[in-house]
């Protein structure tokens, strides 16, 4: 485990990986859902986060659009908990670190569908895509108090 200046810890078993992910605390208003969610799963997840007092898995988002790649349920749970910030890893669909699969047919997902979603402001149906990341996303341990307050000096 590595410690951040705020006391949060980050587990990175792949510390030797050259292309490590950077976890940032991001204004929740800049993150956009990409798929519908199961409200029961959101309620359960929000309860777990509130009970544990820590956030453990960052949300993967497209660096250009803020669209969620992986973590729609976590984003909805954060909104339910009225967090102002969420831990994110910003990634690009270009460069080979992200692969997207269509859960419907198991093949590669047509990324032009995501472009249309961004333009239309819509979301995909529940569990349409499955993303794979290289390297895998890190596990973090961020106290939820840090997600509740937003530093307004920079707005």
Image (tube, rainbow, N blue to C red):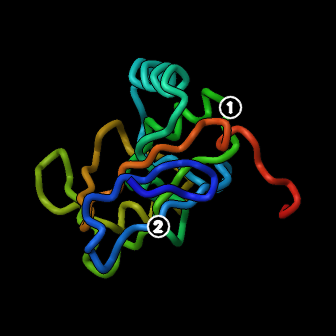
Q: What residue do we see at 27% from left, 50% from top?
A: 129
Residue closer to the observer: 93 or 56: 56
Residue closer to the observer: 128 or 88: 88
- Tell me: residue 144, above or below residue 39: below
Q: Which residue is mark 2?
A: 22
Please, what secondary structure does the residue beneath circle 2 have?
loop
- Expressed as whole percent of the image width and height from the top left, the position of residue 69 reads 39, 55
Residue closer to the observer: 46 or 123: 46
- Tell me: residue 126, above or below residue 132: above
Q: How many marks?
A: 2
The numbered dot on residue 28 is none
Measured in 3D between alpha carbons, the distance from the residue under mark 1 to the one under mark 2, in whole angstroms, is: 24 Å
First-in-chain label (1 vs 2)? 2
Q: What residue do we see at 32% from left, 66% from top?
A: 111
Q: Which residue is mark 1?
A: 82
Q: Residues within 10 Å of mark 2 (few under 14, many from 20)?
A: few
Residue with the most extreme left position: 106
Q: Is residue 120 left or right of residue 44?
A: right
- Expressed as whole percent of the image width and height from the top left, the position of residue 23 reads 49, 61
Disc 1 to disc 2: CB gap under 8 Å: no
- Expressed as whole percent of the image width and height from the top left, the position of residue 5 reads 61, 58
Task: Please identify, in this view, whether the residue under mark 1 or under mark 2 is nearer the observer.
Answer: 2
* Residue 66, quarter of picture: bottom right
Residue closer to the observer: 51 or 64: 51
Quadrant including the C terminus = bottom right
Please, what secondary structure does the residue beneath circle 1 have?
loop
Q: What residue do we see at 39% from left, 23% from top?
A: 41
């Amino acid at each position: 485990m590595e410690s951040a200046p705020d006391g949060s810890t980050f587990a990175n078993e792949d510390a030797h990986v050259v292309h490590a992910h950077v976890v940032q605390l991001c204004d929740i208003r800049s993150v956009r859902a990409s798929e519908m969610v199961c409200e029961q799963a959101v309620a359960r997840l929000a309860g777990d986060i509130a009970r544990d007092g820590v956030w453990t898995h960052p949300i993967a988002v497209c660096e250009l659009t803020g669209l969620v790649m992986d973590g729609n349920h976590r984003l909805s749970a954060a909104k339910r908990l009225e967090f102002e910030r969420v831990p994110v890893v910003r990634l690009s669909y270009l460069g080979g670190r992200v692969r997207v699969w269509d859960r419907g047919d198991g093949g590669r997902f047509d990324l032009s569908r995501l472009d249309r979603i961004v333009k239309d402001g819509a979301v995909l149906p529940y569990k349409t895509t499955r993303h794979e990341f290289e390297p895998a996303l890190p596990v973090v341990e961020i106290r939820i108090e840090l997600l509740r307050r937003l530093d307004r000096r920079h707005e």
